[in-house]
Amino acid sequence: MKKTFTTLLLTTLTTFAVTVGEVPKLVTIDADNGGRTDGTAWSSSMIKDKIHVLFYVDPDEKDTNNAFSEALKAKAYDRAKFASIAIVNLSATWLPNFAIESTLEKKQKEYPYTIYVKDKTKYLVKEWGLKDDSSDIVVFDKSGKVVYTYAGELDDTEIKKVLKMIDKLL
């Protein structure tokens, strides 16, 4: 019984590949799974040399962390040291993909410093264990190591905590 429990626990822990203090498993979201708004593939190997904030969002939860997005925008971090990535979980909504994709293309033009990516197969839910049907935030340091994760809405206290962390990392 004890051996079964230990095996189950280890299996459960290894399914969540996004762990604070570690570089997550290398993933690529290409045309088969979605990709960037320009049709090219996105790879997590791009998460290096800068502080990165990744938003993994169900389109139905798109406004959940607007306060955090606005706080990041107000900080006006140096783009040579800071980057943001918005990955949209297209499989988490009833909305048609073409409508969401059109919106993402507009957002990419409006916010050229943010990389917008479409995830059509819940790829990061499967590969990184991110929460489905949610708004996930993952912060990476310059080496690509995860320094913060959160699923759901960040309150004011949590927003201040994350901004302070980013300020220290820069």
Image (cartoon, rainbow, N blue to C red):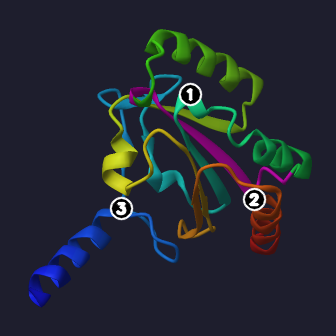
In the rendered image, the quadrant that contains the C terminus is bottom right
Q: Verify whether residue 78 appears in magenta.
A: yes
Task: Give coordinates of residue 25: x percent, y percent.
Answer: 36, 61
Q: Which tag is nearer the camera, tag 1 or tag 2?
A: 1
Viewer-proximal residue, 79 or 99?
Answer: 99
Task: Give coordinates of residue 156: x percent, y percent.
Answer: 82, 57
Amino acid on which disc 2 is placed: Lys
Tell me the residue that label 2 is attached to. Answer: 81
Tell me the residue that label 3 is attached to. Answer: 25
Q: Does label 3 or label 2 sit earlier along the sequence?
A: 3
Q: Residues within 10 Å of mark 2 (few under 14, many from 20)?
A: few
Tell me the residue that label 1 is attached to. Answer: 60
Alpha carbons under labels 1 and 3: distance apart: 27 Å
Query: Is residue 96 depicted above or below 15 in this figure?
Result: above
Alpha carbons under labels 3 and 2: distance apart: 23 Å
Amino acid on which disc 1 is placed: Asp
For the record, the magenta segment spans 77-91
